[in-house]
Amino acid sequence: MTMNAKTAPLLLLSLSVLWPGLSCAGMREDARQLVEQKDFTSALEKYDRLLAETPDDVDLLIEAARVNAWADRHEEAIALYQRVLRAAPQRRSAARMFRCHSHGN
């Protein structure tokens, strides 16, 4: 079977069902691009969807927490950093960095 305009979307759909990380990777990159554009609201919508699929991804939690902080959603950022500390206590520096920045230190 050769790849053409009709088979490519089907292949991508099949791959995303068999390998969910494929669709997550694309959505994560979309979220990062939205952050670069300072469209935090749209980026956070994507991060929320990603976290619904992979709630224990510590790097994703940290990334989402940072974006929440940049969007002045400090309570949400704190809640996400607390999840990081529960899931990976060795990542304390990420939470400490937020505390310093949010208090102007």
Image (cartoon, helix red, strand yellow):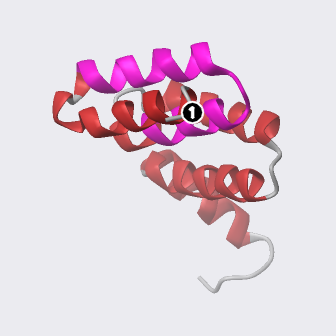
Q: Is residue 33 visible?
A: yes
> Where in the figure is residue 61, as x and y percent of width and height?
44, 33
Q: Which image quadrant is residue 37 in?
A: bottom right
Residue at image location 49% in from the left, 18% down from the top = 78
Residue closer to the observer: 69 or 42 = 69
> Where in the figure is residue 35, as x and y percent of width and height?
72, 51
Q: Which image quadrant is residue 99 in?
A: top left
Q: Is residue 58 left or right of residue 90?
A: right
Q: Main secondary structure of the magenta part?
A: helix
Residue at image location 79% in from the left, 71% down from the top = 6
Which stretch did the figure color magenta?
61-86
Does 28 appear in magenta? no
Mark 1, residue position: 104
Residue at image location 61% in from the left, 36% down from the top = 47
Which amino acid type is marked by label 1? Gly
> Where in the figure is residue 20, as x and y percent of width and height?
47, 46
Question: In this picture, is 104 found above or below 14?
Answer: above
Question: In this picture, is 1 found above or below 97?
Answer: below
